[in-house]
Image (cartoon, grey):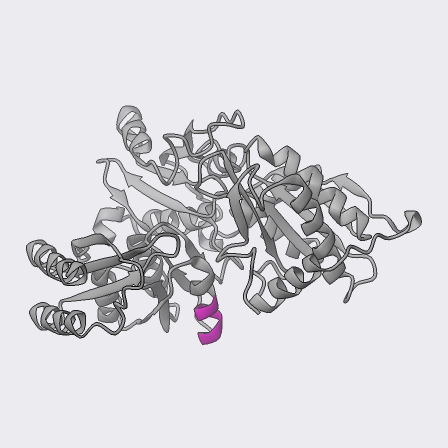
């Protein structure tokens, strides 16, 4: 059975348009509650959200849906996605629910779920929910209705968890001596991230920490890092930390204004663990991970595999191999020795820990890693165009592979939302990457 509502990371869309409407979300809460009650007579779920104005409406609808199915609800208010995952596990609850559209504009919203272990749920569970959605609701009687209450100390519990992910050798010194700019994208971490870094001893300047329900991700955060770059320069800070709206994504900036993406930060996390004498058998990236990082990890003796784009696929690959570190260039970083899911605050702490412990700057950690230039061209497909079986495109790919000679790569993939073919060529030589990408794009057009 194909899924009608669930995408790669829950259910997401524009508020007021199906399926992100209060009536559907009430039905969704009821359907999820029915699925939960197959294995638990009286389930309890945790609901967190980001700072979008639509969160109030969707939270109320979800709460009503769960109550109508006989499920109790704990409400955290605004809290980062990984904070919901942590508390669901720590409080031994049945399910964690996050109301967020991550890095999207405020007019969008979405709903995603975490298991009792704080992990993303499998496709089979999502299919069960969609089957329940298609069936008539089964309202419980009044004595069986669920109850809701607020979890007052959710923020404090999560702050303490983030701080605990520093190694014991770092616990005493923390981040003393560092001056940091923290950009929370006017999102869920606005009242969490600055406190974490302050309580660990850093001097903190906060930006993007004044949400009004409409300004989440607007000109700030991990998707708009120029605000952070400027703030770091203005305040002469050592580093800047940018999160996205639900704080599972990270970008870092150093004192010179250099921006470090998720590929580079993944390398630093791996290299730091090796420097501590820890075993790192391998790391997981995605189809878009820069080839320079793959080659650099291989030089460290660390295996590397590529998953499909999406932190969910990275996590699945890590679990299947028993590895701990993975991530995407967008800043979704996963350290399974710290948390069950990607966490922007925890990832920032892991990277800053490497800097403080070693006395080396981020630039020094990455002095032997120079990202390959990438050229991406979107080519509009004609109706019915069979690019997969095109002999001309296959021949062009073979020609490009010979030109790259093992020091570059080609990725051709369809867009998931538009009739476009994405042609990406990556090479040490930027001019060569441009020529090869244009050659492939022209072949598709012809």
* Residue at the extreme right of the image, as rendered: 143
Residue closest to the eye, 213 or 361: 213
Main SS of the magenta part reads: helix
Percent position of residue 200, x then y = 48, 39
Q: Which residues are magenta?
A: 316-321
Residue at image coords 42%, 30%: 204
Percent position of residue 108, x then y = 50, 39
Q: Can residue 116 be seen at all in this image of the molecule?
A: no
* Residue 96 forms part of the magenta stretch: no
Residue closest to the eye, 276 or 134: 134
The quadrant of the rendering that contains the N terminus is bottom right
* Residue 318 forms part of the magenta stretch: yes
Residue at image coords 56%, 66%: 123
Residue closest to the eye, 388 or 29: 388
Q: Can residue 65 be seen at all in this image of the molecule?
A: yes
Percent position of residue 344, x then y = 44, 47
* Residue at the extreme front of the image, as rendered: 383
Relative vertical location of residue 236 with respect to residue 300 in this rendering, above or below: above
Relative vertical location of residue 156 with respect to residue 8 in this rendering, above or below: above
The quadrant of the rendering that contains the C terminus is bottom left
Percent position of residue 302, x then y = 30, 71
């Amino acid at each position: 059975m194909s899924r009608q509502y669930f995408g790669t990371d829950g259910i997401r869309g524009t508020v007021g348009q199906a399926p992100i409407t209060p009536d559907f979300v009430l039905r969704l809460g009821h359907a999820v509650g029915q699925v939960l009650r197959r294995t638990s007579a009286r389930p309890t779920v945790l609901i967190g959200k980001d700072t979008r104005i639509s969160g109030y409406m969707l939270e109320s609808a979800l709460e009503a849906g769960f109550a109508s199915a006989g499920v109790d609800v704990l409400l955290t208010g605004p809290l980062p996605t990984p904070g919901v995952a942590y508390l669901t596990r720590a409080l031994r609850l049945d399910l964690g629910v996050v109301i967020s559209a991550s890095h999207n504009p405020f007019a969008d919203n979405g709903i995603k779920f975490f298991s009792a272990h704080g992990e993303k749920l499998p496709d089979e569970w999502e299919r069960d929910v969609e089957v329940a959605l298609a069936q008539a609701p089964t309202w419980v009687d009044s004595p069986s209705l669920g109850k809701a209450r607020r979890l007052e100390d959710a923020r404090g519990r999560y702050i303490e968890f983030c701080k605990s992910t520093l190694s014991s050798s770092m616990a005493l010194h923390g981040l003393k001596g560092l001056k940091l700019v923290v950009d929370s994208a006017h999102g869920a971490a606005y009242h969490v991230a600055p406190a974490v870094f302050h309580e660990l001893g850093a001097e903190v300047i906060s930006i993007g920490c004044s949400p009004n329900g409409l300004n989440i991700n607007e000109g700030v955060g991990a998707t708009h890092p120029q605000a952070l770059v400027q703030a770091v320069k203005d305040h002469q800070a050592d580093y800047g930390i940018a999160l996205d709206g639900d704080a599972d994504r990270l970008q870092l900036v150093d004192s010179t204004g250099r921006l470090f993406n998720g590929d580079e930060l993944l390398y630093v996390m791996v290299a730091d663990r090796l420097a501590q004498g820890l075993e790192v058998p391998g790391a997981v990236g995605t189809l878009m991970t820069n080839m320079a990082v793959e080659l650099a990890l291989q030089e460290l003796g660390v295996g590397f595999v590529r998953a499909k784009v999406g932190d969910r696929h990275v996590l699945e690959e890590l679990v299947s191999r028993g590895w701990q570190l993975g991530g995407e260039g967008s800043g979704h970083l996963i350290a399974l020795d710290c948390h069950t899911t990607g966490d922007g605050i925890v990832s920032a702490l892991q990277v800053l820990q490497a800097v403080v412990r070693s006395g080396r700057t981020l630039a020094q950690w990455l002095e032997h890693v120079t990202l390959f230039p990438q050229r991406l061209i979107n080519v509009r497909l004609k109706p019915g165009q069979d690019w997969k079986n095109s002999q001309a495109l296959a021949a062009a790919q073979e020609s490009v592979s010979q030109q790259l000679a093992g020091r570059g790569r080609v990725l051709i993939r369809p867009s998931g939302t538009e009739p476009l073919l994405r042609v990406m060529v990556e090479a040490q030589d930027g001019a060569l990457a441009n020529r090869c990408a244009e050659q492939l794009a022209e072949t598709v057009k012809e």
